């Protein structure tokens, strides 16, 4: 019954906009090991997503990057992926931010950045409602599908509470646990098996 439990396989769900892809525990890539990526674009020309659970080695804050936030508590900026690290993205659930891209499940990407800054400075509740990222993950035509065929990624839905209210470091394990067996068993797979 459990003979295939450690043979990690993709679940053959389309990684469409608003879904997440979760790295196989066997993926041993510096940029993508144990990542959870929110898909922003999936079409025949390629794919784009934002890594949700990686930080920079030297922590970056929005306050360091934007002058008018000196009096605001430090707002972390996460590593969104290895491509375009000079480009900022923000994922949020604040509907009133103009020109935001709806991703489904009450989530939006980007929008009017100055309006978002005004929202933060206004004293309204922004904690647990927005996260900022530098960079993104991108795949050329057919590249992500080839990786899916190699069982590199598992596709799932994202809980808004998991994204905004839980520690980003536990997102990979928790999203796998949410999916039940065999995924919650895979979530226990050691990062460095030889050290176990």
Image: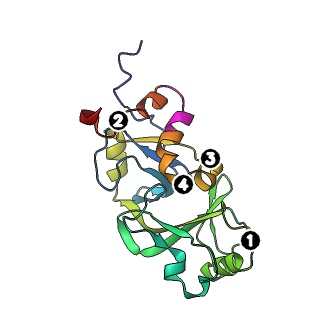
The local crowd at label 3, few if under 14, some if 14 to 19, many if 20 or more residues have their Cα within 10 Å, is some
Q: Which sits in the foreground, 113 or 149?
A: 113
Which element type, helix, strand or loop, lies under badge 4?
loop
Q: In the rendered structure, which disc, 2 or 4, sits on the residue that comes first in sequence?
A: 4
The percent position of residue 17, horizontal first and vertical second, equals 54, 54
Q: In the rendered structure, which disc, 1 or 2, sits on the residue that comes first in sequence?
A: 1
State the CA–CA distance, disc 4 to disc 1. Answer: 21 Å
Q: Nearer the viewer, mark 1 or mark 3?
A: 3
The local crowd at label 1, few if under 14, some if 14 to 19, many if 20 or more residues have their Cα within 10 Å, is few
The reply to whether the C-beta atoms of the residues labelled 4 and 3 are less than 8 Å apart is no
> In this orientation, does residue 75 appear?
yes
State the CA–CA distance, disc 1 to disc 3. Answer: 21 Å
Q: Nearer the viewer, mark 1 or mark 2?
A: 2
At a point 48% along the width and 50% down the height, the residue shown is 169
Q: Which residue is mark 3?
A: 159
Q: Quadrant of the N terminus?
A: top left
Q: Which residue is mark 1?
A: 96
Q: In the rendered structure, which disc, 4 or 1, sits on the residue that comes first in sequence?
A: 4
Which residue ends up furthest to the left in the rendered image?
A: 194
The reply to whether the C-beta atoms of the residues labelled 1 and 3 are less than 8 Å apart is no
Q: Nearer the viewer, mark 4 or mark 3?
A: 3
Which mark is on residue 17? 4
Magenta-drawn segment: 176-181
Against 140, residue 125 (above or below) is below
Q: Which residue is mark 2?
A: 190
135 displayed left or right of 98: left
């Amino acid at each position: 019954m459990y003979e295939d439990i450690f043979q990690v396989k993709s679940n053959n769900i389309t990684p469409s906009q608003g879904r997440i892809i979760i790295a196989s525990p066997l993926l041993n890539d510096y940029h993508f090991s144990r990542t959870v990526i929110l898909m922003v674009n999936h079409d025949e020309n390629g794919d784009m997503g934002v890594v949700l659970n990686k930080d920079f080695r030297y922590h970056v804050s929005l306050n360091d990057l934007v002058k008018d936030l000196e009096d605001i508590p430090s707002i972390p900026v996460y590593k969104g992926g290895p491509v375009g690290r000079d480009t900022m993205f923000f994922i949020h659930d604040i509907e009133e931010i103009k020109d935001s891209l709806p991703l489904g499940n009450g989530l939006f990407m980007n929008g009017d950045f100055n309006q978002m800054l005004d929202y933060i400075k206004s004293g309204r509740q922004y904690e647990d409602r927005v996260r900022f990222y530098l960079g993104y993950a991108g795949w050329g035509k057919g590249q992500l599908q080839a990786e899916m065929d190699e069982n590199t990624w598992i596709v799932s839905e994202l809980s808004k509470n998991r994204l905004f209210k839980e520690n980003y470091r536990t997102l990979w394990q928790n999203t796998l646990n949410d999916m039940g067996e065999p995924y919650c068993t895979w979530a226990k797979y050691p990062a460095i098996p030889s050290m176990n």
